[in-house]
Amino acid sequence: MAIDSSPEKLADEAQVFIPEEWEEAADVVAYDSITCPPPICVICGPPNSGKTTFSRHLLNVLIHRYRRVAYLDTDVGQAEFTPPGCLSLTLADKIAPDLAIPCLKTPERCFFFGDISPRKDPQTYLKYIHELYDYYHQTIRGEHLKIGVPLVVNTPGWVEGYGLNLLMNMLKHIAPTQVIKVHVPTESKNLPTGAFWLPDPASHEVTLIDINSNRQDSSKKSVQSQDDARLLRDLRLLAYFRKCVPINMSLTTIQELDHALAVHAPYEILMSSVTIKQLHSQDMEAFYKSNCSIVALADSSLSCQNSPCCVGLGMILHTLYLVLINN
């Protein structure tokens, strides 16, 4: 299948429309006079409601005031600044001119979860989120308290059943100053009212802001049907691995990228010098099943609370270790 993943093509297909309600909500977070130290804002709601689009808009508004903003991405299926399957903490200092164009950044800290949903291993998923937030709180927020580095937390759309329990756990640990709840027309899909994660809402001061989903283009036509999760994941992988090839090489299809990577010279090292960990499984044949698979490259010297931090993605080919890219 041929896919034109150029920024120009993506921009032509979906110019993002930001409604006035969203602009007002972002201004409340960014310019709330009682917010000191800077805000910690969590965006949550059902799938396909526009959480990521709003979070990127909020990021732009906050950069205007604070210059640097931290972004905690907990949506492994639709990661914003990394390839899919990752949980990351990224520092942003430049405004994104077009919210419709995928934008990859090198994160401050990153864990490779290895799946597009937390369903298989929710405890590890929560552990990584807690560690990323703790790193922000202790290192970034602590060192830059006078300057102020706010935090934007984007969450996945799994808000029913056990997914709601995960979100509540996340909210309790982060203790945000503001929570943006995105609503969709189907009421049964929306989150519970109020500070639903707190046993006693009066025990923690938090500003709740409700906004309506508005998946529209610049002509105010719904773009909900255009949201193809698999296509967006493919585009982010294309953008990530494209950095392995010369910048002047034209790549507009998956087939062209496949060819470019196939002729890319690998790095060869002994398998005995690395440790292979099979995620979400105790399969003894992990080595054989990892052949020709995308894997995370982790550095144990960069461990965050005993969890090796991901420094890039690569691929295993037979007895060779093929490093496609390193952040």
Image (tube, rainbow, N blue to C red):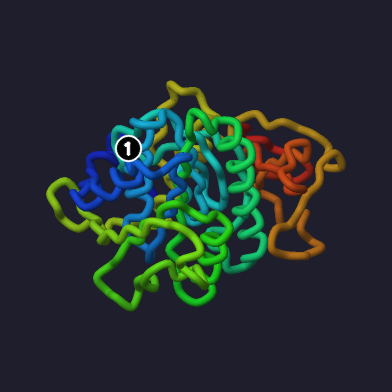
Q: Nearer the viewer, residue 136 or 303?
A: 136
- The number of numbered discs placed on residues in the rendered structure image is 1
Relative vertical location of residue 326 with respect to residue 288 in this rendering, above or below: above
**Residue 89 position in % (x across, y down):** 55, 42
Q: Is 324 on the left or on the right of 175, as rendered?
A: right
Residue density around tag 1, few if under 14, some if 14–19, many if 20 or more, within 10 Å: many
**Could you say where residue 216 lies in the image, as x and y percent from the top left?**
21, 53
Q: Residue furthest right?
A: 272
Q: Quadrant of the C terminus?
A: top right
Describe residue 302's horizontal placement relative to residue 115 as left or right: right
Coordinates of residue 101 in the picture (x, y in percent): 34, 39
Residue under circle 1? 61
Tell which of 50 and 183 is nearer to you: 183
Q: Residue furthest left?
A: 219
Q: Amino acid at mark 1?
A: Val
Q: Residue at x 65, y 49 (%)?
A: 131
Residue 55 appears anywhere in the view: yes
Residue 254 appearing in the image: no
